Amino acid sequence: MANYLEMSTEELQAEEKQLRSAYQNFKNMGLKLNMARGKPGPHQMDLAMDLFKTTDYTSEDGTDARNYGNLEGLYEARRLFGEVMGVKPENVFVGGNSSLQLMYFLVSVGYTFGFPESPCPWSQVDHPKFLCPVPGYDRHFRITEEFGIDMINIPMTPEGPDMDMVEKLVAEDPTIKGIWCVPQYSNPDGYTYSDETVRRFAAMKTAAPDFKIFWDEAYIVHHLTDEIIETPVLLEESKAYGHEDRVFMFTSTSKITFPGAGVSALACSDNMMKYVCKRFEVMIISYDKMNQLRHVRFLKNKAGVLAHMLKHRRRLVPCFDAVKTTFAQKLTPCGDIAHWTNPKGGYFISLYVMPGCAKRVAQLCKEAGLVLTGAGAAFPYGKDPEDSHLRIAPTYPSLSEVEQASELLTVCTRLATVELLLKNKV
């Protein structure tokens, strides 16, 4: 392989011919590979099957978990999530299997009713807005899009969102009502916000009195290296500035036990806890306390969670390494045609291909039997301004499937690049 950016037209045409032959070989295999969503594989979910051994559903305080009551969740479940997130149990609300549902509900509350400090419900604001660090989590963006809330792209850096831009916008515009954040092992880049970024979030002045930070700690214990990275606890940091009411922290066991049958949690201030419970109690009497108790008995505490996640790590690290090794072997020699992240945790690798190529790469992969998350999905409205980003999820397939998918992906990336370079030479 040689540097594509230094090739003549004739050399590129010869390379294209070879790549099309390799690509056709993949198509002839009739592959059915999927690296679209960050789902745990069967072997990861098998690790939690002992969770079902619980037979006694009486909680520590004598509550029968099978019955009504305890809207905020069983205390031992609140304590477990509080330990994981670094907050007091009293500041934790334990929900059902989906933290995304909690996020949707709180955006809905803001839109329909507003919050105690809101001048009016967000629905009565002319063009309410949310800030969206990009690339980011597509399902976050779909929530605000669902409510017709305008979304503003904020560039991501390895330290977190561009805080100069965030601080300027929120200080000037009272119609900006919130921001989406994945502060640890961000989806999809795998970046962790710096201590300074967290402090600036806690301290910043906002024109909107009801500005909310949706702080999604989806990957707070999902380490891929020996380094246990932890960030300052935003809810606690915000108290020093009197801004704790703006913080909503979320996490779940979706990628710890079972995505479809786990437990989620929300952490917020004392004031916000009273208010959100007032809104929740109209909708639900309590979430699944039996499942909460099963999870507490199985995981026990934060140390138990981290020990369990070590088992996940043994399954995941070879898959992440397979992707990065293949990229390095098959893309790096071709010149500056692509780069990718090297996450220390989380569930994704970001692949940045040559601008104008991402949709073509995804199309080629799909036609050869490899499904990726749609190009542009990590941006609001599905619009990647550069058409360069692809989110790679190496968690669900087997290791051999990940290796095969990575090989195909590099062929598709090189082919799309050569096609574009030849087009530009015309």
Image: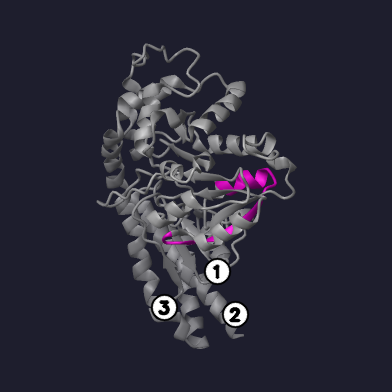
Residue 417, image x, y percentages: 51, 73
Q: Nearer the viewer, residue 318 or 265?
A: 265
User: Which secondary structure lies at badge 1?
Assistant: loop
Q: Give the residue pinned by disc 1.
A: 357
User: Which secondary structure lies at badge 2?
Assistant: helix
Q: Is the residue marked by circle 1 packed among few (<14), some (14-19), or many (20+) residues within 10 Å?
A: many
Which of the image's four quarters has the N terminus? bottom left
* Span of residues in magenta: 140-159
Task: Say whether residue 334 is visible.
Answer: yes
Q: Are marks 2 and 1 in contact (CB under 8 Å)?
A: no
**Which disc is residue 423 wearing?**
2
Quarter holding residue 358? bottom right
Q: Nearer the viewer, residue 131 or 51?
A: 131
Residue 187, image x, y percentages: 46, 52
Q: Nearer the viewer, residue 257 or 361?
A: 257
Q: Give the residue pinned by disc 3.
A: 335
